[in-house]
Image (tube, rainbow, N blue to C red):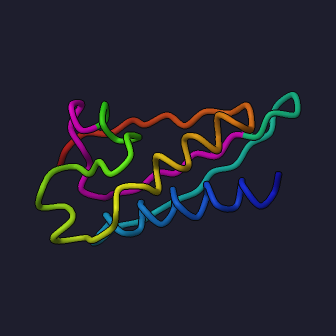
Amino acid sequence: DPKRLKQILINLVGNAIKFTMQGSVKIFVSCNNRILQFVIVDTGIGITKRQQKRLFHPFSQGDHTVNREFGGTGLGLAISQRLANMLGGEICVESAKG
């Protein structure tokens, strides 16, 4: 479903851009055995392991300062995770604060 895939990528890349004040956001795409993989790498602020556990919960953001400083509702990643699951995929995160 190209429309849903586009929505997922817009949310993921948008988040990477939003939280990267300087440096870069890179997108890598590969296809093996008809399975597409997108990897988004950024030099953003990062998040803790505790924040990663809440990352895909609706209305959840890193902490109270995130909404004030960066805005957003905390729904984009939750929606993206659900869409990816519906399409038979998954979204994983690797990050470190700082």
Q: In the displayed structure, would residue 52 be above or below residue 16?
A: above
Q: Residue 88 at what x, y percent from top left?
A: 73, 31
Of 79 and 14, nearer the camera is 79
The residue lying furthest to the left in this view is 65
The residue at the point 42 percent across, 60 percent down is 16
Q: In the displayed structure, would residue 57 be above or below residue 75?
A: above
The residue at the point 36 percent across, 69 percent down is 18
Q: Residue 92 at what x, y percent from top left?
A: 49, 34
Residue 13 relative to residue 50: left or right: right
Q: In the displayed structure, would residue 23 be above or below residue 34?
A: below
The residue at the point 35 percent across, 41 percent down is 55
Magenta segment: does it hold 68? Answer: no
Of 95 and 1, nearer the camera is 1
Q: Residue 6 at what x, y percent from top left?
A: 70, 61
Total labels: the figure holds: 0
Residue 98 relative to residue 74: left or right: left
Q: Which residues are magenta?
A: 37-51
Residue 20 relative to residue 16: left or right: left
The residue at the point 74 percent across, 38 percent down is 87
Magenta segment: does it hold 50? Answer: yes
Of 91 and 59, nearer the camera is 59
The residue lying furthest to the front in this view is 58
* Residue 64: quadrant of the picture: bottom left
Q: Residue 85 at what x, y percent from top left?
A: 64, 34
* Residue 47: quadrant of the picture: top left
